[in-house]
Image (cartoon, rainbow, N blue to C red):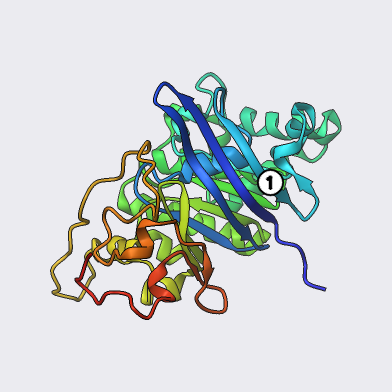
Amino acid sequence: MTAAPVLRVDGLRVDYPTPRGELAAVDGIEFTVERGEILGLIGESGSGKTTTAMAILRLIQPPGRIGGHATLDGGTDLLALGEKELRRLRWRGMALIPQGALNALNPLLRVGDQLEDVILTHEGRGARKGLAERLDALYQTVGLPRRVGRHYPHELSGGMRQRVCIAMAIALDPPLVIADEPTSALDVIVQRVVAQTLLDVKRRLGIAFVLIGHDIGLMAQLADRVAVMYRGKIVEIGPTEELFASPRHPYTRMLIDAVPAIGHKATVKVAEGLAPDPFDQAPGCVFQRRCPYVFGPCRVAHPPLERAGTDHSVACYLLRDAAAPTEGASA
C-alpha cells in the first residue's frame, strides 16, 4: 500500500475583497508533497508562492479568505482546524523557516533560550530532562557550534541566524517544513552553506520541504520536483531535472532563458512584459498577454493542468492542439 503524501493540497484559494473587486491571490491550485522530498515553488514576485505557504500554515490575515483543502499526513485538513488544534499542530506537524531570520528571532532572548522555549512549550516541563543534549544535537545537525546558544541574534552572521531558524523548525521533528526564500537575503557563499544545511536535514531526518524561491539555480540544486506559479495558478509541475531540461510551458521556458548558463555563450533572453495586473479578469489563459504562442483557445478559458509525462503536468493548450502556432508566431 502506497503511503499517503505528507501534504495534499486540493483547490486551494486565497481571496481578498478590495474596492476594485475580489482579488484571487491563489486560484484553485493542487499539488502533493511526498515524504522526504523537496518541492520547489518558483515564479516572479506576485505569482502567489508565499501566499500559498501562508495559507497552508493558516497565517493569512483578515480580510483574506482561504478555501479548499490542505491535508497533512493523509488525515488532518489544516484548513478545517480550530485555533487550539492548529496551535498544537504547529512545530509538531509543520513548521516555517522564514525569509528574514533577524526579524523572526526575538532580539531580547539568547538563541538557546528561544530553542528551549519551542521544545518546552509543546512538550511541557518534563522535556527538561536531556534538553541540553537535544540542543547540542540540533546545533550539530545544522552545522553550528554549541556556543551559538549563548548569543543574541544580532551577534550572529546572517547565515548563522538562518541556520538557527532551521534548527527551530526541526526541533520537534515535524514531517513538513515550509521554507520561504531562506537564502534570499544572503550572499552567494552563505547561500551555499544554508542550502547544504537544508539538504543535510532532509537526508538525515527525512523531513519534507516546500521550498519557495525565485533563484532557479538554487532550485535546480535542491528541489526534487518544481512547481511553477503564475498569477495564482500552477502552470507546470514536474521532476526538477526533466522540467529544466525540457520545459513544456512557455512561462517556464521564459524563466529559464532569463538565467545565464556557465559555459554557454548564448545571449541571455530578457523576460518580456511585466507581471500582470491581478485585477485583469480577461477570460482565457493567465499567461496569454505575454505568451508568444497565444492562439484561439488561449483566449477562451484557462487550460487545465494535465499530464505531460509520468510525473509531469502542464497547463497549456499547445500540448494537445495540433493546430497550435509554431515558435515565434502569435495570433
x and y, in percent, of residue 24 in the image:
48, 38
Q: Which residue is mark 1?
A: 69
The image quadrant where one finds the C terminus is bottom left
The image quadrant where one finds the N terminus is bottom right
x and y, in percent, of residue 66 in the image:
61, 35
Tell me the quarter of the picture where residue 277 sits: top left
- Judged from the image, the secondary structure of the residue bearing numbered disc 1 is strand
Q: Residue furthest right?
A: 126
Q: Residue at x 34, y 55 (%)?
A: 287
Q: Residue furthest top?
A: 108
Q: Is residue 319 above or below residue 170?
A: below
Q: Residue at x 17, y 65 (%)?
A: 268
Question: Callout 1, which amino acid?
Answer: His
x and y, in percent, of residue 251 in the image:
33, 61
Question: Position of 323 compared to 274: left or right?
Answer: right
Residue 302, visible in the rendered structure: yes
Which residue occupies the foreground of this view, 165 or 285? Answer: 285
Q: Residue at x 60, y 53 (%)?
A: 141
x and y, in percent, of residue 73 in the image:
76, 54
Q: Residue at x 39, y 59 (%)?
A: 218
Which residue occupies the foreground of this view, 29 or 284? Answer: 284
Which residue occupies the foreground of this view, 277 or 244? Answer: 277
Which residue occupies the foreground of this view, 108 or 41? Answer: 41
Q: Residues within 10 Å of mark 1 (few under 14, many from 20)?
A: many
Question: Position of 190 compared to 236: left or right?
Answer: left
Q: Is residue 127 above or below residue 264?
A: above
Residue 164, visible in the rendered structure: no
